[in-house]
Image (tube, rainbow, N blue to C red):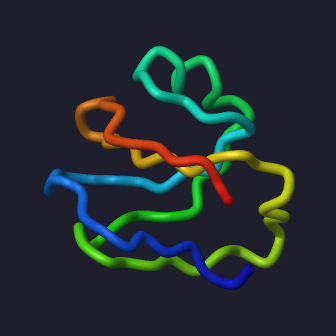
Amino acid sequence: MDRVWLDGAVSPGPDYRLYLTKDIVRTKEGFETARASAVQIGSIKAFENFSLNMPDSIDVSDYGAVLIWCETFSAFITAAEIS
């Protein structure tokens, strides 16, 4: 997989980051627990229909979900299972 795509929109906010997590996480507390095994893919610069390059060193099959996190406010934004 070369890129991670979002077809849709998220509410605008500062300093959003895209992470891969082993399992689906649906809360701030859940992400804080899972963060040690999560991998950050990159910063999100758009809030609708965006994509990010996937680092070559990442094997997506090792992860079960993607997650958007706001670093500025330590806030869970959204997550989805990888299909």
Residue drawn 41% across and 48% down?
A: 68
Residue 38 spot, x, y in % from top left: 67, 40
Residue 24 spot, x, y in % from top left: 61, 35
Name the residue at the bottom extreme: 2
Residue 46 spot, x, y in % from top left: 25, 73
* Vertical position of residue 14 compared to residue 49: above or below: above
Q: From the viewer's perspective, tell me whether residue 1 is left or right of residue 82.
A: right
Residue drawn 52% across and 27% down?
A: 31
Name the residue at the left extreme: 12
Q: Who is closer to the viewer here, 18 or 78?
A: 78
* Vertical position of residue 3 compared to residue 64: above or below: below
Residue drawn 61% across and 31% down?
A: 35
Q: From the viewer's perspective, tell me whether residue 67 is left or right of residue 12.
A: right
Quadrant containing the C terminus in the rendered view: bottom right
Q: From the viewer's perspective, tell me whether residue 29 is left or right of residue 36.
A: left
Quadrant containing the N terminus in the rendered view: bottom right
Q: Who is closer to the viewer here, 31 or 5?
A: 5
Residue drawn 46% across and 15% down?
A: 29
* Vertical position of residue 13 compared to residue 4: above or below: above
